[in-house]
Image: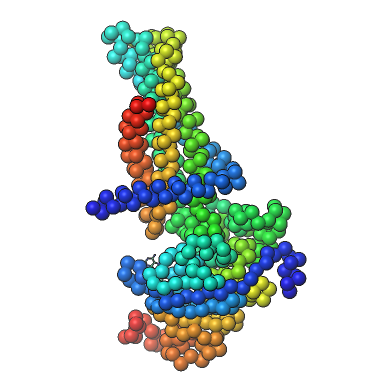
Amino acid sequence: MNQNAVENGERQRSSIGLKIENFSKSYDLVPVLNNISLEVNPGEIFVIMGPSGSGKSVLLKHVAGLETPTNGRIIIDGKDIAQPRTRRELSMALVFQAGALFNSMSVFDNLALYPREHRLYDRATLRQKVMRALETLSLQDAAKKHPSQLSGGMRKRVAIARALVMEPELILYDEPTSELDPTMAATIIEVIADLREEFGVTSLVVSHDRDLALTIADRVAILMHGDLLEVDTPANIKRSENPKVKDFLNPVIDIKNPRFKKKDYSS
Amino acid sequence: MKQINNILEHFGGVLILCVRSFAYLPSLPLQWRRLIEQCFLIGYTTFPIVAILSFFIGSVLALQAGYSLQAVAGQDFIGALVGLSLARELAPVMTAILLAGRVGSAISAELATMKVYQEVDALVTMNIPPERILVLPRLVAILLMMPVLTISANLIGWLGGAIIAQNIEFIQLDQRIYFQGIQNFVKFRDILDGLIKAEIFGFFVILVSCHVGLRTTGGPREIGASVTRAVVISLILILVLDYFVTSALMKF
Ligand SMILES: Nc1ncnc2c1ncn2[C@@H]1O[C@H](COP(=O)(O)OP(=O)(O)OP(=O)(O)O)[C@@H](O)[C@H]1O
Ligand SMILES: [Mg+2]
């Protein structure tokens, strides 16, 4: 396995873990996340599920160090992300929910920006690495296109490919399989699992995708309205007795008695 | 109170952005492609309009000077008047104002869009400081291009003045006398003062536009607001700085 990695010209990667300690966030005094504590082990695939608006994207942005918490700390590989040098020492990638592609650059240049700016490879290796990432996500024909010429799902795939080229030790995915067809979603799930198998990459995945959570996750966290309800293995989460968790994972579609007409709907 | 606070915050932010960007100066040789691209962008968006405007400003200066000076038979001084006004004041100020409209607005729109659509965040997560690749090349490019634009504005303006002075009936000043006037009265020092002013205005226009763009938050409406804000701040800054820089230069 390692031999294989060296042959492919991969850089050495080590597994890193992360820890969120008593984390809270409010925007203009409106609390979005309340006292979250969780730990992701090195090499783990950790999935966070939760309804829309529960604060998942906000949590990922803080883990990536893009915003400062109102309270609490985020420790990655033993270092506080609030420290400016931490990010320089880490190799971490964030796949944004909306892609966040560079609109003025072609797809190829989007992927090549990171290795170019950090002077990682010579021209031929760079080209080969970028094309390999594009092929993994069936994007080889889109290399010359600009983000505005892509479909929503393609943009998502380019964002994932861009993270792959960075060869990080920790990848944060914000809904990697939304907007994708079932086959493509399965491919993404395989890619995430394979990165762990081959390189010990740690993955923190935000997703509504039950297949993803229940097949490859080591542990699943359920986040609702800013609170962490449960953190457990997929098998235990499936058997959860918490009615909110049950309803979230297996919503019963009842046309006669729709939930938006129930009294306690908004709680 | 809040207004004053805001202004001070802007001021501090601009200063920090400037320092942070120039801290990446050693990376400039590796970014030469971006630098050249920015130089061309500034050049070909601003030059045509600078050329047209300076031509007509030179013309109207000659016209006004000729009209006023004919009463005292002082047509010989038209060259000096047009030459000095352009070199010391009008060429740098006008070039900077056009720069704010053409380039400053474009930069603030581009950076604001990148900020709002999380492209700047993406750069940060890639350990690529936005100041290094988005701000530094633009600042250096304007320092290189501003003298070129200002000198062009001077030359084209002088030419415009010459054509008017020779061809308008009540002036009919020989071109040789006109240019002799420029030669006798416009010293190297006058041109240099103008270039220093242009350099300072241009630098601040780009710096402020970058700063305003990068601190945009919200959505499309805020992008528009940022563009307006960048241009308005630039224009005020140019005219305020103009007074202080001019009076400072007179003391040396
Ligand atoms: N910059 C901000 N300012 C104010 N409120 C914000 C900001 N960003 C997010 N919020 C609020 O935080 C809450 C959580 O948002 P977040 O984007 O994390 O949801 P999410 O769980 O990712 O939802 P989805 O599954 O739809 O992507 C929302 O109520 C949102 O309005
Ligand atoms: Mg989200």
On screen, residue A4 versus residue A92, left or right, reads right
**Residue A149 visible somewhere in the drawing:** no
Q: Compared to B55, does A30 lie above or below?
A: below
Name the residue rendered at 45%, 53% in the picture: B113
On screen, residue B123 versus residue A27, left or right, reads right
Farthest top residue in view: B73
Q: Quadrant of the C terminus of chain A?
A: bottom left
Q: Nearer the viewer, residue B251 or A22?
A: B251
Name the residue rendered at 38%, 87% in the picture: A257
Query: Which x, y percent locates residue A231?
Result: 49, 84
Name the residue rendered at 55%, 86% in the picture: A233
Taking the image in four quarters, ligand 1 sits in the one at: bottom left
Q: Nearer the viewer, residue B125 or B252?
A: B252
Q: Compared to B62, does A135 lie above or below?
A: below
Q: Quadrant of the N terminus of chain A?
A: bottom right
Q: Compared to A149, does A252 lie above or below?
A: below
**Residue A132 picture quarter:** bottom right
Farthest left residue in view: B1
Q: Compared to A27, does A36 lie above or below?
A: below
Query: Which x, y percent locates residue A56?
Result: 45, 73
**Residue B198 picture quarter:** top left
Query: Which x, y percent locates residue A249?
Result: 49, 84
**Residue A34 visible somewhere in the drawing:** yes
